[in-house]
Amino acid sequence: MGGTAPRRTLAAAGLIAALLLPGCTRQGKFSPVDMWNRSRLRPLEASPQFASGSSAQALVPGTVPRGPLRVDNALYTGRSGGVLVSQFPLTVNDRVLKRGQERFNVFCSPCHSRLGDGKGMIVKRGFTQPPDYAIARLRGAPVGHFFDVMTNGYGAMYSYASRVSPEDRWAIAAYIRVLQKARPVVPTDQRTSSGAPYEGTVTRARS
């Protein structure tokens, strides 16, 4: 029993030392909160530790990227040379349209309705009404517009980039074209639910 107390004392001392060590600065000085603020490197801040003088370092040659390379701007941004694309960057077939319909019904129809007339169930319960896809402005919009809206948000609509993959966003855009062809032209924007325009502060969020 006589050796129990010293062992407990040593264990306690070791535990205290372990708790205090993370508080050391890069210079080895004690500061219990420094690792949570001043000690960490912030993006692009100056750093004397690297020859470049910056905390941001170039990738090691031969680095293998995680995930797919997003070199196709049209496919991943809906733009080419900064301009919204008018052609689909992937092949549109029955499989893509079926997938687009399924994803549209899940993510878009609550506001836009399954017809695309902007009178979905959420709108009937008071949410801001989106425009009818059949109006001239949207019929004439380049297909990249719909991808861009799903990616970045628009007006009262927030971004779906974290919820819908780029390929599914294009599938939805393709299905929107089907909805437009299936309905008669709506000459003017006939939204009357709130009187407020749908185009407002743009919500931005990248994929």
Image: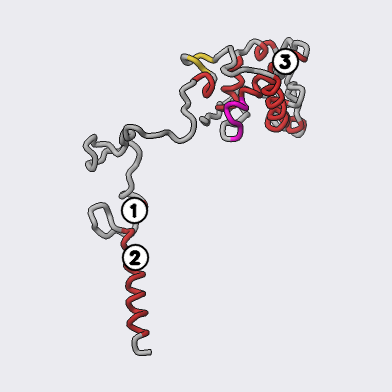
Local SS, label 3: helix
Lateral position of residue 12 relative to residue 46, left or right: right
Residue that badge 1 annotates: 35
Q: Residues within 10 Å of mark 3 (few under 14, many from 20)?
A: some
Q: How far apart, in angstroms, are the residues tagged by discs 1 and 2?
A: 14 Å
Lateral position of residue 182 relative to residue 58, left or right: right
Q: Residue at the spot x=31%, y=50% of the render? A: 39
Q: How far apart, in angstroms, are the residues tagged by discs 3 and 1?
A: 57 Å
Q: Residues within 10 Å of mark 2 (few under 14, many from 20)?
A: few
How are the colours assigned in the image? secondary structure
Amino acid type of the residue that numbered disc 3 sits on in the rendered structure: Gln
Q: Residues within 10 Å of mark 1 (few under 14, many from 20)?
A: some
Local SS, label 1: helix
Q: How far apart, in angstroms, are the residues tagged by discs 2 and 3?
A: 66 Å
Can I make out residue 129 in this image? Answer: no
Residue 180, numbered circle: 3
**Front of the two marks 1 and 2:** 2
Residue that badge 2 annotates: 18
Could you tell me residue 149's position as x and y percent?
59, 24
Give yes or no for contact between labels 2 and 3 (Cβ–Cβ under 8 Å): no
Could you tell me residue 188's position as x and y percent?
72, 12
Could you tell me residue 91's position as x and y percent?
61, 17
Amino acid type of the residue that numbered disc 2 sits on in the rendered structure: Ala
Q: Which residues are magenta?
A: 163-169
Q: Quadrant of residue 132?
A: top right
